[in-house]
Amino acid sequence: MISATGPGTFVWWLSAAALPPLIYWLYRRRRTVMNWSANLILRQTIRQEGRKKLWQAVVIIALRSLAIASAVLSLAGLVWVRPPPAGALPHGEGTLHQIVLLDNTRSMILRHGTGSREDEMRSRLAMLLKRLRHGDHCDIVLLASAPGSRPAMLSPPCPVPDDWIGRHCAELELQELPAAVADALQTAAERFNAVSARNRHLIWLGDLSGKDLPRLDELRPLKRELQTMGVKTVAYEIRDRAAEKPNIAIARGELSSGAPLPGWVCHLYLSLRNYGRQSASSSLVFQVLNAGKVLENRRMPIEIKPGEQQTLDLAFSPPPDVEGRLELKAEAFDESYPFDNSRQWILPVKPKLNVLLVVPADEDSVPRTLWRDSRYVELALLAAERPSADRPAWAFPPAPRGPPARPRPPPFTPTAPRSLPSSRVRFSMTSHRLAPARPGR
């Protein structure tokens, strides 16, 4: 769909009516008689050239007409307009100039529903950016600014790429600065005057409570100016009464490794955040379950100041005989927060690793580096996960190429020396699990 906007529309219709005279003026040489009829102009032009030069005249007229049409279309300012996606706010035909007044002050950290006002603001901003089409304009004015300075502004390309939305929505940080509402509105009015568009939307995205809003007499000239430009104002106020109560919630959780090993220590890094206005204390319950059986159950008190975040290191070690999957559950209890405040993780446990060891009678000669060097342990796990015909699961793969990071032990040969009696050496095949090195070994 093609839409002509601005003064180029008048030029486009004028050029369509004046195309035949322009062709004649470009093609004529020294003729003083002008006939404004398009058919007569073309007929007289073709007759003067003769039959031998008829094809030359047709080609020249076609090329010059194409050049004039291209120049007129470029001056008309035509843009390709695509239909808005499903669920987007309809703004009719033509281009849209959208200015979002984004509240990035610290008041957006408070609780809102099952998340925070900050999360709600990011999701609504992503929705507003995804509805933009080719030819539209968008400006994001950040309200948090230092006194005496103009608010910062972002101008993404339209349509906005998905990577731009994800990157800027994730990098948006809340600041300990006042909200300059009057300066932001003045910046929006200047941007509306600078950009020509058919539809204009001014969108407030934030919290109106606790802001230093300008007085009504200060906004009257600006409001009259915005109404004259045909600006449509939309306000998304993000506010929740339950946010006034202090509460602590789980912000995120991250595991140190993907799948734990039986007997090995794993870490769960849990981040807790206070979304209230006051210091709050709560209790955190951490459980490790396997097939409905509780392996670990901890309860620890926590106290966090308003707006701050605290990260806990929860270490756990699966028993050596555990199999199947582990279920990790962390829950923060807060009486003032009525919603679900728990997180769960399901982890598969690494299978057993059967290793064939040829142990001499003197156990002190067993290479200790085999158990202490994590390099050999990782190679053994790879061999156990991907067995093959020439490399069974119980055999260690060869050492990695390149210079070793530490001195390697001499190769161990299971054959006994001929000078020693055979009774001094014994061979045994045992099935072991990988476990941390014992003290003194």
Image (cartoon, rainbow, N blue to C red):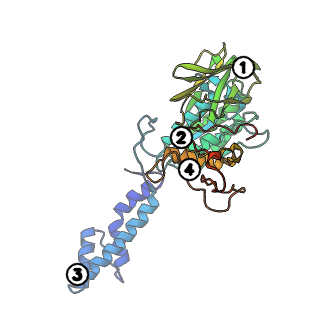
How many marks do you count on the picture? 4
Report whether residue 230 is seen.
Answer: no
Residue at which label 4 appears: 396
Residue at which label 2 appears: 354
- Expressed as whole percent of the image width and height from the top left, the position of residue 21 reads 34, 69
Label drawn at residue 300: 1
Residue 239, above or below 99: above
Pointer 1 or 3: first along the chain: 3
Disc 1 element: strand
Residue at which label 3 appears: 47
Disc 3 element: helix
What is the crowding at mark 4: few (fewer than 14 residues within 10 Å), some, or many (at least 20)? some
At label 2, the amino acid type is: Asn
The quadrant in which residue 268 appears is: top right
Of the pair 310 and 353, the residue shown nearer to us: 353
Q: Are marks 3 and 2 in contact (CB under 8 Å)?
A: no
- Which of label 3 and label 4 is nearer to you? 4
- Expressed as whole percent of the image width and height from the top left, the position of residue 102 reads 63, 36
Report whether residue 128 is seen.
Answer: yes
What is the crowding at mark 3: few (fewer than 14 residues within 10 Å), some, or many (at least 20)? few
* Residue at position x 60%, y 54% in the image: 415
Pointer 3 or 4: first along the chain: 3
At label 4, the amino acid type is: Phe
Disc 2 element: loop
Disc 4 element: loop
- Expressed as whole percent of the image width and height from the top left, the position of residue 334 reads 67, 16
Pointer 1 or 2: first along the chain: 1
At label 1, the amino acid type is: Met
* Residue at position x 62%, y 53% in the image: 416
- Which of label 1 and label 3 is nearer to you? 1
Tell me the distance, in whole angstroms, between the alpha carbons under discs 3 and 4: 95 Å
